[in-house]
Amino acid sequence: MKGVHFLISTLAILASATFLVSASDPSPLQDFCVALNDTKSAGGYFGAGAVFVNGKFCKDPKLVNANDFFFSGLQNPRNTQNPVGSNVTAVNVDNLAGLNTLGISLARIDFAPNGLNPPHTHPRATEILVVLEGTLYVGFVTSNGDGNRLFTKVLNKGDVFVFPIGLIHFQLNVGYVNAVAFAGLSSQNPGVITIANAVFGSKPPINPDVLAKAFQVDNNVVDYLQKQFWYDNN
């Protein structure tokens, strides 16, 4: 009986581990699965019954080449002349097909002086940020159950900071010159939800009564905010 109990306990632990692992991008079962947006260019790999892998079709491995794993141009400064003073250049499965199923992506973030990467979340990824130039004030807020605690740090060139998956975070250039940072993300398609855009710029708009009650402000304030142009720097 002890052996049976041990086996049941082991299976329960493995089941729990499998559930936890499935919370992030699944591990690939092949060397690569270069993404395609349609089956017509799949080279017959899946035949008539083409399937999605992580939301993308797989290219026939025999037709894959080095360019499927290549992206160029991140060395060039980006235009930060916009309302928030920042520009995010994402490199994910949508513009680097070879990332499909590999569970990783990155982004270059350019900041003008006082430029902000506004509070946002990545629903599918943890982010690790390294500062290449400038000085950034960064932080994240924990979930309701943890009391919405704010963790902040001022980062200089060469400093690294981690933003846990799903938590609201931000970066602000507190220096007098342009700043540049690179971010690695633990998903091929981390997603981004900019808080102000989502709450006040949704299409169609959220009922003002909902937002007035949630933020404990007058409906006129909500109406003013919903009429603003919510710039998306991603």
Image: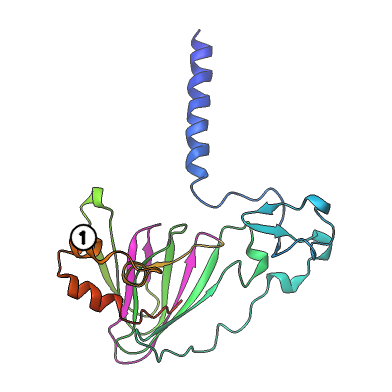
The picture places residue 127, in percent across and down from the top left corner, at 43, 64
Q: In this rendering, would 127 be left or right of 96? A: left
As helix, strand or loop, the secondary structure at mark 1 comes to: helix
Residue for badge 1: 214
The picture places residue 215, in percent across and down from the top left corner, at 19, 64
Number of numbered markers: 1
Nearer-the-camera pick, 28 or 81: 81
Q: Which residue type carries mark 1? A: Ala
The picture places residue 57, in percent across and down from the top left corner, at 71, 58
Q: Is residue 173 highlighted in magenta?
A: yes
Rendered position, 26 above or below 7: below
Identified at 24% across, 60% down, the residue is 210
The picture places residue 193, in percent across and down from the top left corner, at 40, 66
Q: Is residue 162 highlighted in magenta?
A: yes
Nearer-the-camera pick, 194 or 11: 194
In the image, the segment drawn in magenta is: 160-187
Identified at 43% across, 59% down, the residue is 126
What colouring method underlies this structural image? rainbow
Identified at 71% across, 62% down, the residue is 34
Q: In this rendering, would 2 be left or right of 113? A: right
Q: Counting other residues with Cα less than 10 Å from the Cα at mark 1, is it few (<14), some (14-19), or many (20 or more)?
A: few
Q: In this rendering, would 126 be left or right of 217? A: right
Q: Main secondary structure of the magenta part?
A: strand
Rendered image quadrant of residue 103: bottom right
Q: In this rendering, would 139 be left or right of 2? A: left
Identified at 37% across, 73% down, the residue is 159
